[in-house]
Amino acid sequence: MQTNEVQYGIWYLEKHKIWITTGAGSELPNTKKKDVKGHFINDWNYRPQNWNISLYSSFRAHKDHIMDVTEITSKAAIATCSLDHKIKLWDLSTGHKLGSLKPHHITGVRTLNYTPDFGSLLISTAHENAMKVWLPEVSIQKAYAGTLEGHNTLIVSARFIKNSPYLVSVDDRINLRVWDVRSLLCIQSVSQPYKRSTCNGLCVLSELQRIVVYGKTLLAFDATTEKTRGKEMEVVDDAYPIKAEFNEYNNSFIVVTKADVRVYDGENGKLAKVFTGFGKNQLVEITFCCINERRFYVGCSDGSIRLYNINGLLIKQVVEETTYQREGSRRSDYKLNTRSISGLKFVQKDEILLASSFDSTVSVYDEANPETTFRLRKLEGGHLNAPITCMNYSEHLSLIATGSMNGEITVWDYEMSRVEGVCLGHTREILTLNFLDPCPLLLSTSTDGIIYLWGVRSLQYVCLATLLNIHVKDFGFPSLCVTSALVLRGDKIPKQKNEYSKMKEEELKDIYLKSIGNSNKKRFIDPKKVLNSAKRDERMYVIMGDEKGRIRILDLRYVIKVLSIEPAKRHRDDDSFNAKRKENCNVSFIVTSELSK
């Protein structure tokens, strides 16, 4: 059967007993309509007795590539997803659209999977590290049921286990998670068994009770005996560090994991204490921790914030936990909490706690009273609906910077709670933000592998330079993701400085600076000049760690000298400064106008 368009996808719908293909073309098949661009759904009649194939219907479904099609078994309907960020439901008998599922994904939607059990749930994955759960048969307009968060990298696929309340998901590093759709919580994590394998997707063989991950190799997991290829399958402890700091008050290292806070002796490196039990539910994870000498704040995935002393004793609960709520009488009417804490910062001078969460809000709390806490301000709309992934504060510039999942950076005035500027350049999730006080500069890192240097306050919130994290062996390939960046000041010179003098000329490509003003000219910074360009007490080091485990040290004083950046005056005036103003503000309109420029 020949068509007028290129066919790039095919699915067989078992319940409906039909074949579906997707294609892209410039006109509708079997019609005289011209210049109808888009991506189409084709419904085919197939009679195996005489090998007869005919086109039953065709309709334009999406503006971009259609990634997946799944059937809704209770009615003659299908759900489709596309790189245009949308999920749509269609009536197969008429070809009419039943509706779109909102809110849409931030990125293009990758896969769909449906189960008629436990309330008829639909799961969708995008080019993100979170999944969305829908109830399309309850209400199409209000089908959103919640978000499943837990993976650290992009989710490749997710599949329901037939006749059970469980969902299995896998990310691009072959880390598996098992979810209970009744409570929308992760009940088990499984580490990658083979580090050199790749993952293109997974399928569930319900009759054999097997989970198969396919890529360059096939990995089969037994859902009952927890074995893979005859060997015991290791269950992830998830005890990897998410934050580490040195506490000068008691000369100790404090390492924060998702499950506990660990204190190591600064002299011998031995584990001294382990603090656990930061949530009423064992499934609650620590998402962020702010350490302040003799006490520390802990933010959890249930939206709660607690204050502990250095001995691990609870002082007070700053923010109450918000549980997974059920609305109505239906078992499937769940509303998932999205207030997981993504950033905490304690301002010692004002006794103010800044907290950002994945619901795209920033809250300002008064911590002057050691027994009670009340919220002074709530900032929202700075990233529209994109989750905030990191936050930082500059006392010298009196600014708050927040970064989101879609790569946007919003800078707020600390006192007046207004948006000072929006920094656009990154294309993926923001990982770290660092103010380079006293200079009016902001350094940002992202999973796109590019480090941006932004001008703030008087420098109009524009990109001044881009730094690519590349290596000689990787030169010419995409930049490596900088997973962490730390800014250090002072006269202490890193021990790695002598290594630069031994580098060959071609290895100077490790640190690459492209001036945003003249993008055609590429200049490479000589690391030898970096170390000899400034006085010891003026040095400003950026220590970067990337996804391959390498640590780089860059002295930004030479970069600042090249860009002719002068230190900024202290912005806040203590005589008239009021850090405890009470105000709630929504800046969605301002940010929308900035993005439309």
Image: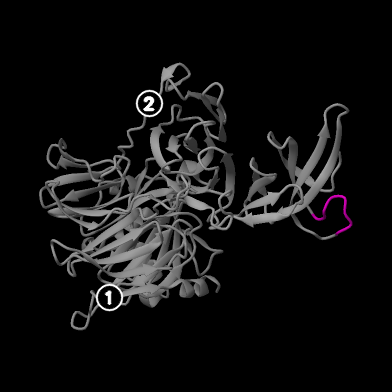
Residue at (75, 52) in percent of width and height:
95
Q: How many marks?
A: 2
One can see residue 362 in this view: yes
Q: Position of residue 102 (x, y in %)?
A: 55, 57
One can see residue 554 in this view: no
Residue highlighted by disc 1? 582
SS of the residue at dot 2?
Answer: loop
Q: Which mark sits nearer the N-terminus, 2 or 1?
A: 2
For residue 521, the mark is none
Q: For this view, does 1 lie left or right of residue 306?
A: right
**Which secondary structure is most common in the magenta stretch?**
loop
Q: Position of residue 76 (x, y in %)?
A: 70, 44
In the current view of this chain or complex, which residue is farthest to the front? Answer: 329
Q: Amino acid at mark 1?
A: Lys
Residue at (28, 58) in percent of width and height:
344
Residue at (19, 70) in percent of width and height:
350
> Looking at the image, which is closer to me, 583 or 554?
583
Q: For this view, does 349 lie left or right of residue 29?
A: left
* Res 105 quadrant in image: bottom right
For residue 234, the mark is 2
